[in-house]
Image (cartoon, grey):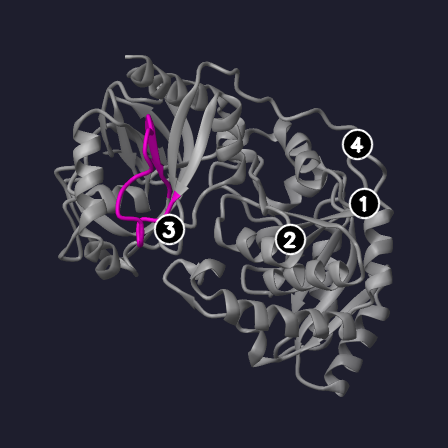
Amino acid sequence: MLGPRLVVAGTHSGAGKTTVATGLMAALRRQGRVVASAKVGPDFIDPGYHALATGRPGRNLDPWMCGPSLIGPLAGRAASGADVLVVEGVMGLFDGAADGSPSSTADVAVALDAPVLLVVDCSSQAASVAALVHGFATFDPRVRVAGVVLNRLASDSHEAMVRAAIGAMAAPVPVVGALRRDERLSWRDRHLGLVPVAERPDEVAAALDHLADLIAERCDLDRVLAVAAAAEPLEVDDVPVPTRVGAARIAVAGGRAFTFQYPDNVEALEAAGAEVVPFDPLHDPALPEGIDGLVVGGGFPEVMAEALAANEALRRDVARRVADGLVTWAECGGLLWLARSLDGHPMVGALPVDAAMTDRLTLGYRTAVQQADSPLGPAGTVLRGHEFHCTATTPAGAALELTGRTGTGPGGFATPTVLASYLHVHLAGQPALAEAFVAAAAARRAG
């Protein structure tokens, strides 16, 4: 049963919803509440901030990758044992995938029958904010905009003008918070968004502490909780889990360089029979002993290429084991690490490919069809995922036929024991992929 819940959405991607959502989580936790979190869409970085704020895993609700029918079950998993679920939206409230399929924050709010707190950037406007709020509140009758948080206000008089304009609306929306411009709330970012928490934990923790103070002072937390409590209890199913297909010991990369890993993916591998063993490619001299499989997700190896290159012992160990048939799955940053080089720095060399940073952001959902057998299944296996990177490999590879909003093209590398590509996959919506990978690793152990 899904209980109190709310969705924090923005009028646009820069409205400040991440700041408000994360601050609300931290402030409510300070009150002694058990707070659960989720992020609409495929983003890896924001859930790391959520996890720091709540002390619980940051989850994702992605209708495009997992299917609309799983949004309720995934939210139920995220909210298990919590007093309230705070869901941070993606982009603007109504923005979604280019193909028009359910994927927006609004779609998720409707699927969860959840009220929305709308974060509005009030910079350089006053009465116009009321027009924005009116438009967002009436654009889609399925969506309940139950409160507004005013962001980036310049002064008390600015706030008073905006509040007066909203109050004069034919159907006013309650203002539950009002935040001033504050440079201390501008967390560091770079080419793919915010800097992951794992890279600067002390700095982020200090900023989050200040943010929780500010949110507690400038937002009416009782009204926020009342908005969440107004959501009727929602019966949701359990998340389908993979069938246990065997026993295998699988190393999963972590540490500061590889922070992009959905908790649901680790749990899916475990449900299929894997013992997951973490390791840190920056510091560990070798892969864990007795492993049958290797998973290297995404992250920022391009930022730490020199340090990764310096760990020569691990690079040699991984190259040897992959060549010997270690069952391996690499996504995006993992692909870069397994390459021969990254921006001129030597990498593992398990793949005959070189990688480099570019000035072009590649971003979007992809439907991928395997063109060769891999540990995730035979040729013809279909994967749904997303790409998010500013690098390119030479050659690009042809293991997958990837279709997105701009067309179809090849990418990635595969053998019966390796799949390495830019594609990120969420296993909650594709449990058969977890079963295939664990089965391949278990077969290696048995063989």
Which one is nearer the viewer's eye here, 238 or 180?
238
Three-letter amino acid code of the residue under disc 1: Pro
Compare marks 1 and 3 and give the one earlier in the sequence: 1
Secondary structure under tag 4 reads loop
Given this view, does label 1 or label 3 mark the residue nearer the observer?
3
Q: Which residue shows up at 48% across the image and 24% down it?
A: 430
Q: Secondary structure at mark 3?
A: loop
Look at the picture and state if 353 lies above or below 248.
below
Mark identifier at residue 55:
2
Quadrant position of the N terminus in the picture: top right
Q: Hey, what amino acid is under mark 3? A: Gly
Q: Nearer the viewer, residue 237 or 30?
A: 30
The disc, 1 or 2, on the residue closer to the chain's N-terminal end is 1
In the rendered image, residue 281, in percent from the top left (x then y), is placed at 31, 49
Q: Main secondary structure of the magenta part?
A: loop
Residue 179 image position (x, y, % from top left): 70, 75
The residue positioned 87% from the left and 54% from the top of the image is: 226
Q: Are marks 1 and 4 in contact (CB under 8 Å)?
A: no
Mark 1 sits on what residue? 4
Q: Which residue is the site of mark 3?
A: 299
Residue 28, quarter of the rendered image: bottom right
Splitting the image into 4 quarters, where does residue 358 fall?
Answer: bottom left
Q: Secondary structure at mark 2?
A: loop
Q: CA distance from mark 4 to mark 3?
A: 34 Å
Q: Which mark is residue 1?
A: 4
